[in-house]
Amino acid sequence: MKTPEQLESLEGQQYLVLRPTGELADRYSAEQTDALALSRLPHPHTGHVTLRGFYEPERRAELSALVHAWAIEQDPIEITGEAIDAFPEPWQILILRLARTDSLLSAYATLTDRLDAMDFRRLGELPLDEWTFHMSVVYGATLSGPEWKALESARVSEFARPVHETATQVELVSYSNGVEHTEVIPLGR
């Protein structure tokens, strides 16, 4: 996030994300460029897959320690883009939907197990069977119903060929004093 408004809205929060850097990142960038050509909308400035969100401004070191302990036991994570899809009203978010690969499901589940033993404040968490793994492309909540439907119908489609990538690290991103901080943590030993 780059704008002062975005940074202010995230103050005190932390997010554990996968940040694709290869073929999936390229596809994401192309899809976002195409969507923005149709309508200038707020959007993430880098593609990422959020595994968890937290609000722990006073316990970032504890949170980081938990993530490091989880990451060292976590194998690299297979992520596969399968479609451009959308979260409907009231969210109106165009997404790159990810397949529920075994390694992505396992990573989410083992992270949940570790987190359940702690009292960290988690943001927007859903049970694994309800979670849609995705990369947000554009945020369309400011569009009228008809404008959103037009964007959705122009962009939503299954990929002819899934796009695969293996994540070998996670990032713990935190926001404090109007600045984004990133800690890169390798997966596995």
Image (tube, helix red, strand yellow):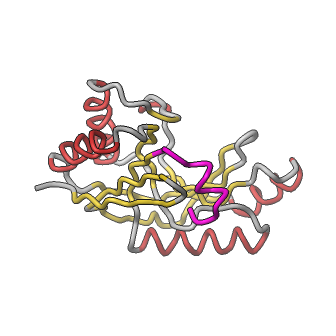
Seen at 29% across and 54% down, the residue is 77
Where residue 172 appears, x then y in whole percent?
36, 53
Where residue 142 appears, x then y in whole percent?
81, 52
Q: Residue 45 occupies which quadrant of the picture?
A: bottom right
Magenta highlight on residue 81 = no
The vertical placement of 3 against 148, above or below, is below
Quadrant showing the C terminus: bottom left
Magenta highlight on residue 3 = yes
Quadrant showing the N terminus: bottom right
The vertical placement of 134 against 25, above or below, is above
The vertical placement of 27 against 91, above or below, is below
Where residue 165 appears, x then y in whole percent?
35, 65
Q: Report the front residue among 157 and 76.
A: 76
Q: Report the front residue among 153 and 5.
A: 5
Magenta segment boundaries in residue numbering: 1-13
Outermost residue to the front: 177
